[in-house]
């Protein structure tokens, strides 16, 4: 049985309904941008420790690169 693909418009509608029923509210642009910047920073920190010259700190141990990428998305 073939699974139907969800269109972008349908996904947006589902998110909108979730926010209206379960979520608190939509956040403004500044809040969304700063949250995204925070998540990108966490990803960058882990990449610098995994592939760059920085060493792992205790707080970075156990973090997963894929999880950090998913947070950015």
Image (tube, grey):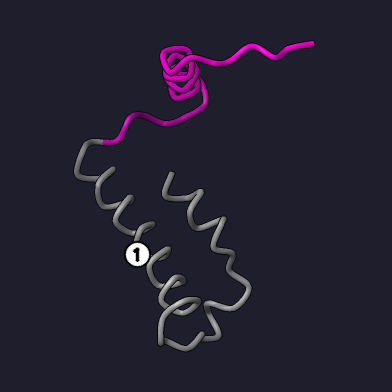
Q: Which quadrant: the N terminus?
A: top right
The residue under the point 21% across, 38% down is 29
- Give the vertical position of 28 relative to 3 (above or below): below
Q: Is residue 8 magenta?
A: yes
Q: Position of residue 2 (x, y in %)?
A: 73, 12
- Give the vertical position of 27 relative to 5 (above or below): below
- In the rendered image, which quarter is residue 40 located in? bottom left
Q: Which residue is mark 1?
A: 41
| Viewer-closest of 48 and 61 | 48
For the view shown, which residue lies furthest in the right direction?
1
Q: Position of residue 47 (x, y in %)?
A: 44, 70
Q: Position of residue 59 (x, y in %)?
A: 53, 79
What is the secondary structure assignment of the residue under circle 1?
Answer: helix
Q: Position of residue 69 (x, y in %)?
A: 48, 54
Q: Is residue 49 left or right of residue 3?
A: left
- In the rendered image, which quarter is residue 16 located in? top left
Q: Which residues are magenta?
A: 1-27
């Amino acid at each position: 049985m073939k699974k139907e693909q969800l269109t972008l418009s349908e996904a947006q509608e589902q998110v909108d309904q979730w926010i209206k029923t379960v979520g608190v509210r939509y956040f403004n642009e500044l809040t969304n941008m700063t949250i995204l910047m925070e998540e990108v920073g966490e990803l960058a920190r882990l990449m610098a420790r995994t592939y760059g010259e920085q060493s792992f700190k205790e707080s970075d141990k156990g973090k997963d690169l894929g999880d950090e990428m998913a947070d950015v998305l």
